[in-house]
Image (tube, rainbow, N blue to C red):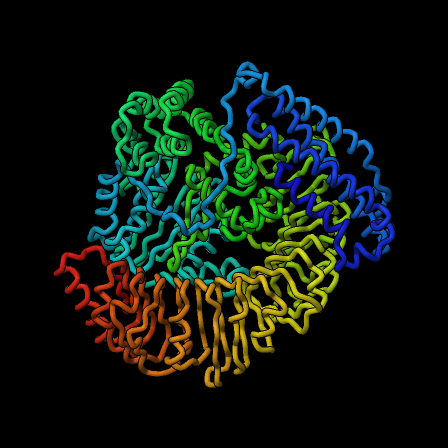
């Protein structure tokens, strides 16, 4: 537990001591009797932290490091004792005496407090004598730079997807020619090379190439990796195509049938990334129809024999190492971003790239280290010397080189980075979920009044800037990063460093017997278990130090009764079983009072009120069949910030008191929106459904930034008011008159506007010179609009315009092409006159020399 975890523990102590609206604390004599002792512990922890703040500038000193480790060690033990005490109280109150054995009903913190006092005394003496300490007290290892506050708090603040491709132009041209050549039978092209040499980068550039996109009707990306799972591959294919509904519960044969149905008769490009085995290819190739229409399959693999087996008569392209000049160009681009490099950097820089042996991943990661440090010749020389000791042509040597990047990670980023190693190879991290997990695990350190989620976004952006995490997907509308991944070698680095740092990750790779962990760890050192086997049982997961269980494998029906293991899980903070399907939510889940993150799905839509006893809960992800009716005591979850469901709405009958919810998905309500201010005054991201034709007044929600509103009352007298804080708005089925667009136009911060399926009714939208001051993204989909009158001054900041299935729309205003910021016009399923207006815009802009405006026109 780092300082962020200690902060979260102290917040818990503060709630136990002072919280007056939690009946569990205020009505329990055992807890009330221990409040004075908990108050003393809170005071002692606060005192040590204050002392720490005076000597943080000397954190490079070995003595300071050792004392900080001792402090964290004692604080972890204190949390373990307190959490075990709280669990014992809950177990006895619930009458579960049969599992209470081994749980200490009393709370004795005397030894803990003595240890804290000892640490504080040593800290104080060091603060007094510390000025006499000199450089001889420094560690022999490379010192870690002091923590720098993260000032950027948005994953939209940098276009991180603008990849730098150095030395690949010839490779792209050669392979692109092979992909689009006039050969009717399905052709296979292979890219072969070692890990980190750029196979996926090259495949990505080809996949997104404008000519390739135009040539193929369907493009699919699927990642296979070492452990082949047929079902996972089928699901990836279908999700890439866009066929999402009800796939998880379909049989494998049904999935294969759907793949064939969606590809038959179409010219497709299938990218199969990171394929390891001949047997895998023999299985995967059967999924794709063999129409003679010019379809192609592009493989990337580390193994020549796989490529030769897949296409003995096709193109096998061996990716070469970068030469020294190309490596230097890549390093400069990553470090200096197109600016001129200092003269002094050339000599050590050339030594650095020479030591990287032409491996792009090594160059990129080392560049991440250099870019984060001040430009100092001495530092570059040190890095040149340290990379010289590694033979990067071997993957183990590359791992050592990548380790330099870890050594230069600020302390506050290390746990976040190590955590990534627990997930499977090529795992696609949904950013929203990853951030919620980081917060729940206690990795995020408070910074003034900023939200922990915003701070976590800054952490992720910093790790991306260091080239340790790859951006896999971003939102078309606002450029926000939606998903990311890590390279296989970087994941290996995570696992290696996790073992060295005793950051306990139990995975298939580290699935040692439980007695090994008992010997390796003290009882209060957190163990995190990541499950991605095909065995739908939990009997192999059992230790009282267990703090996290995440089922990150493919979707499975859980045949085991999870409740029978809860006596071993009482200290859990994270329980993610979303990829398991349960028949019912276990009634005894309320034993897990330390849960901060719960993700679960089940067949029953009954939501037991006992979940509302999980007062530590921050994130609740819950899916069932049909509307989930939440109990009135849901407001007892005083720490709940995110209430989320992917496929079904939440229904509120009534709420006893206001909640601190920031994110609510799929909310169905009967009252008018004015009640939102009463119930959810802090909500920032709201997706809701209304069947009412009452006034939808969201103006009082002064924190709201994202709103998605769907109404089933299309022909009702809908009206809407919105807060000035709104940045993203999506409307569907509201049936608003186009005259109400003035309400939206007046929003000073609106950047994204999506109008879907009867959001507005009427054949004509005339902007009447209205100016959408900050709007960057506009989508019109399935609207009955025929005439659109607008001017370039109406959308001074617009970057992307999408028009989908507006089959009555006659044209796009010609002046839209004159918007200086416009980058893309995209239209699907349109009438001929609309297509002709787009062609006129394109011709006019190109006649004026504007080739930056792109067009994506598809009849559908």
Q: Is residue 843 above or below residue 732?
A: above
Question: Which residue is pictured at 78% across the width and 33% down the height?
Answer: 113
> In this rendering, does residue 600 appear at all?
yes
Q: Nearer the viewer, residue 848 or 259?
A: 848
The quarter of the picture where residue 423 lies is top right
x, y percent for residue 598:
64, 54
x, y percent for residue 158:
38, 47
Q: How many marks?
A: 0
Q: Nearer the viewer, residue 715 or 147?
A: 147
Question: Which residue is pictured at 54% across the width and 79% down the height?
Answer: 691
Q: Is residue 815 left or right of residue 490?
A: left
x, y percent for residue 494:
52, 34
> In this rendering, does residue 250 appear at all?
no
Q: Quadrant of the N terminus?
A: top right
Question: Which residue is pictured at 82% across the width and 41% down the height?
Answer: 37
Q: Nearer the viewer, residue 342 or 158?
A: 342
Q: Nearer the viewer, residue 351 or 380?
A: 380
Q: Is residue 764 above or below residue 663?
A: below
Q: Quadrant of the C terminus?
A: bottom left
> Please, which residue is most extreme toward the top here?
136
Q: Is residue 46 above or below residue 793?
A: above
The quarter of the picture where residue 732 lies is bottom left
Q: Is residue 726 left or right of residue 415?
A: left
């Amino acid at each position: 537990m780092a300082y962020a975890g200690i902060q979260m523990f102290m917040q818990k102590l503060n709630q136990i001591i002072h919280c007056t609206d939690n009946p569990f604390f205020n009505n329990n004599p055992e807890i009330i009797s221990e409040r004075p002792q908990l108050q003393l512990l809170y005071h002692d922890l606060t005192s040590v932290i204050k002392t720490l703040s005076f000597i943080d500038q000397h954190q490079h000193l070995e003595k300071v490091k050792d004392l900080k480790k001792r402090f964290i060690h004692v604080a972890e033990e204190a949390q373990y004792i307190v959490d075990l005490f709280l669990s014992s109280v809950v177990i006895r109150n619930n009458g579960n005496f049969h599992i209470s054995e081994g749980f200490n009903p009393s709370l004795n913190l005397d030894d803990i407090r003595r240890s804290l006092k000892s640490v504080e005394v040593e800290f104080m003496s060091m603060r007094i004598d510390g000025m006499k300490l000199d450089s001889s007290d420094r560690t022999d290892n490379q010192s870690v730079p002091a923590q720098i506050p993260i000032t950027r708090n948005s994953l939209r603040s940098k276009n991180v997807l603008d990849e730098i491709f150095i030395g690949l132009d010839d490779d792209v041209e050669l392979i692109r020619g092979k992909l689009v050549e006039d050969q009717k039978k399905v052709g296979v092209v292979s890219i072969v090379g070692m890990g980190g040499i750029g196979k996926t980068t090259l495949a990505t550039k080809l996949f997104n190439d404008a000519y390739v996109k135009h040539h193929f009707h369907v493009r699919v990306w699927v990642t296979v990796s070492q452990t082949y799972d047929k079902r996972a591959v089928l699901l990836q294919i279908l999700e890439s195509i866009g066929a999402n509904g009800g796939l998880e519960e379909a049989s494998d044969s049904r999935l294969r049938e759907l793949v064939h149905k969606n590809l038959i008769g179409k010219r497709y490009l299938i990218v199969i990334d990171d394929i390891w085995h001949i047997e895998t290819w023999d299985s995967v190739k059967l999924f794709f129809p063999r129409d003679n229409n010019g379809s192609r399959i592009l493989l990337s693999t580390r193994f020549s024999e796989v490529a030769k087996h897949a296409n003995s008569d096709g193109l096998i392209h061996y990716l070469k190492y970068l030469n020294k000049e190309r490596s230097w160009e890549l390093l400069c681009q990553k470090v200096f971003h197109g600016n001129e490099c200092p003269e002094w950097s050339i000599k050590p820089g050339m030594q650095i790239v020479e030591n990287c042996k032409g491996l792009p991943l090594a160059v990129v990661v080392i560049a991440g280290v250099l870019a984060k440090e001040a430009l100092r010749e001495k530092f570059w020389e040190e890095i040149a010397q340290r990379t010289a000791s590694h033979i990067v042509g071997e993957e183990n040597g590359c791992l050592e080189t990548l380790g330099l990047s870890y050594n230069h990670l600020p302390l506050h980023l290390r746990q976040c980075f190590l955590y990534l190693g627990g997930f499977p190879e090529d795992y696609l991290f949904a950013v929203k979920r990853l951030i919620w997990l980081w917060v729940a695990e206690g990795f995020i350190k408070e910074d003034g009044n900023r939200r922990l989620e915003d701070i976590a976004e800054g952490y992720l952006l910093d790790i991306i800037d260091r080239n340790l995490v790859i951006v896999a997907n971003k939102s078309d509308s606002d450029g926000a990063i939606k998903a990311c991944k890590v390279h296989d070698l970087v994941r290996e680095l995570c696992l290696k460093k996790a073992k060295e740092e005793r950051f306990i990750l139990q995975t298939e790779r580290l699935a040692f017997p439980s007695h090994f962990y008992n010997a390796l760890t003290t009882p209060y050192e957190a163990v995190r278990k990541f499950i991605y086997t095909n065995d739908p049982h939990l009997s192999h997961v059992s230790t009282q130090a267990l703090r996290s269980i995440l089922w990150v494998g493919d979707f499975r029906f859980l045949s085991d009764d999870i409740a029978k293991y809860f006596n071993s899980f009482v200290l859990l903070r994270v329980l993610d079983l979303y990829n398991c399907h349960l028949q019912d939510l276990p009634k005894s889940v309320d034993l897990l009072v330390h849960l901060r993150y719960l993700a679960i799905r089940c067949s029953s839509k009954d939501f037991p009120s006992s979940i509302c006893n999980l007062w530590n809960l921050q994130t609740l992800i819950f899916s069932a069949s049909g509307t989930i009716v939440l109990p009135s005591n849901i407001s007892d979850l005083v720490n709940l910030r995110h209430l989320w469901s992917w496929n079904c709405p939440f229904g509120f009958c009534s709420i006893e008191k206001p909640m601190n919810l920031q994110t609510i998905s799929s909310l169905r309500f009967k009252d008018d929106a004015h009640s939102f201010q009463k119930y959810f005054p802090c909500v920032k991201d709201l997706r809701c459904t209304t069947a009412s034709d009452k006034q939808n007044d969201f103006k009082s929600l002064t924190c709201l930034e994202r709103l998605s509103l769907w109404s089933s009352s299309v022909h009702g007298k809908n009206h809407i008011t919105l807060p000035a804080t709104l940045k993203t708005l999506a409307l569907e089925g509201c049936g608003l008159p186009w005259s109400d667009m003035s309400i939206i136009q007046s929003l000073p911060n609106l950047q994204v506007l999506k109008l879907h399926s009867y959001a507005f009714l009427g054949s004509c939208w005339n902007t009447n010179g209205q100016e959408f001051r900050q709007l960057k993204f506009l989508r019109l989909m399935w609207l009955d609009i025929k005439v659109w009158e607008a001017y370039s001054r109406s959308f001074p900041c617009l970057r992307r315009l999408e028009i989908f299935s507006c089959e009555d729309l006659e044209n796009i205003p010609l002046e839209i092409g004159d918007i200086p910021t416009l980058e893309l016009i995209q239209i699907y399923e349109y009438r001929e006159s609309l297509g002709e207006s787009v062609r006129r815009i394109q011709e006019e802009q190109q006649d004026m020399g504007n080739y930056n405006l792109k067009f994506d026109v598809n009849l559908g």
